Image (cartoon, helix red, strand yellow):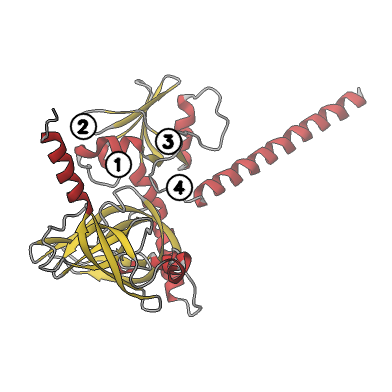
Amino acid sequence: MVNQNVKDKMDRKGACTAYVRGQKEDEMKDTLLEISGKFLTGKREPYMGTGQSEGNVKLEKYVQMMERGEYMQIVFEKVDANGTLSKVTDGVTVRMAAKEISGEAYDLRYKSQKLADTYYVRVVDVDQSGSVVWVSHNEARRDKRPEIEDEINRRLASKKKQDIRVKGKIIRIQSRTVQGENVDTGVWLDLCGVGILGFVYIGNWAQTFTPSLRGTVSYGDVVEVLVKEKRIRKQKRGDVPYYSCSRKELVENPWDRLALEEKYHVGDLVRIKCLSLKEGHWFGEINGLEDIQVFTEYPSAAHDFRIIPGMEYMGKIYYINIKERSLKARVFQALTLERYAVEEHGEGRSDG
């Protein structure tokens, strides 16, 4: 009998130890989940989990998550005509209203993009009669935003010089009209996925000159940037605080990587693809030489052909300076247009 009592005490002690150990592991998982930086919605592998056992999903589980203020990560599988996202798991329907992504209803033209994203959410309501769980990404990121923003401000104010590296999602490419031409000026970011505004001026996007951002980046791309300073944007509806950021320090300089002085020389003939037209000149890309823009002059009167973005031309390098990061060329032959002319002539010709 005594031995049985001792055994029972040992069993209870073991069970208690296992419970405490399990509780600590759950707390550790929750902590890791919170600091893992998964507030950025993006295209990731479909996954839904809370760091807990994935067995049979019960409605009570979501009630407990709501009461504890816990978060979970989710990829939805359907979006309706109103923009509401949903996913059915073991008889429980998890839904998120259109306004619960960022606080305002999104443009329904982007429903497919919203459906493809992964969301870090918090349970905000449980309808037990209908087995429906309502979640919010906006509530989850609002909970976390003050903590992240305070940390950014603390590092900016620190006397110790340090790089403040964060990730952000591109939410808009900014442009303005210059002499009737649409010119990109930078990108707006959602820093850390919690609604903190960041802006990267086009001159701080890369180590080399960037004539345009469209076609290079798009909405939803996640990029790493350095936070430089906090600024205020003056608007009629009120001042908007944002963080000025830079990306160029975090990417490799193609001039250093490609050893151009060994591959190209003044007088070399090269194929140049037109990227963008400017007043008095245009920018191109040498075939096989990516990330470096070639300053190219328009053809002389002796060579009468049009310069069209996307077309290829034969040209000659007349200036190259590695220290100045400068590469210039003149074109004298329209390769693509000439090929088209030959093809059209060939199609219109009848033999025999």
Q: Earlier in the sequence, mark 3 or mark 4?
A: 4
For numbered disc 2, what is the local secondary structure? loop
User: Spatial distance from mark 3 to mark 4, Cα to Cα?
Assistant: 11 Å
Q: Amino acid at mark 4?
A: Lys
For numbered disc 4, what is the local secondary structure? loop
Q: Quadrant of the N terminus?
A: top right
User: Spatial distance from mark 2 to mark 3, Cα to Cα?
Assistant: 20 Å
Q: Earlier in the sequence, mark 2 or mark 3?
A: 3
**Is residue 5 in view from this perspective?**
yes
The quadrant holding residue 230 is bottom left
The quadrant holding residue 266 is bottom left
Residue ID for mark 3: 74
Q: Earlier in the sequence, mark 2 or mark 4?
A: 4
- In the drawing, what numbered circle is on residue 100? 1
User: Spatial distance from mark 3 to mark 1, Cα to Cα?
Assistant: 14 Å
Residue 154 percent location from the top left of the image: 45, 70
Labels 1, 4: front one: 4
Residue sitting at 53 percent across and 22 percent down?
56
The quadrant holding residue 323 is bottom left
Residue sitting at 47 percent across and 76 percent down?
158
User: Spatial distance from mark 2 to mark 4, Cα to Cα?
Assistant: 26 Å
Report whether 147 appears left or right of 99. Answer: right
Q: Amino acid at mark 1?
A: Glu
Residue ID for mark 4: 38
Residue ID for mark 2: 82
In the depicted structure, whether residue 87 falls above or below residue 295: above
- Of all residues, the one furthest to the left in this rendering is 180
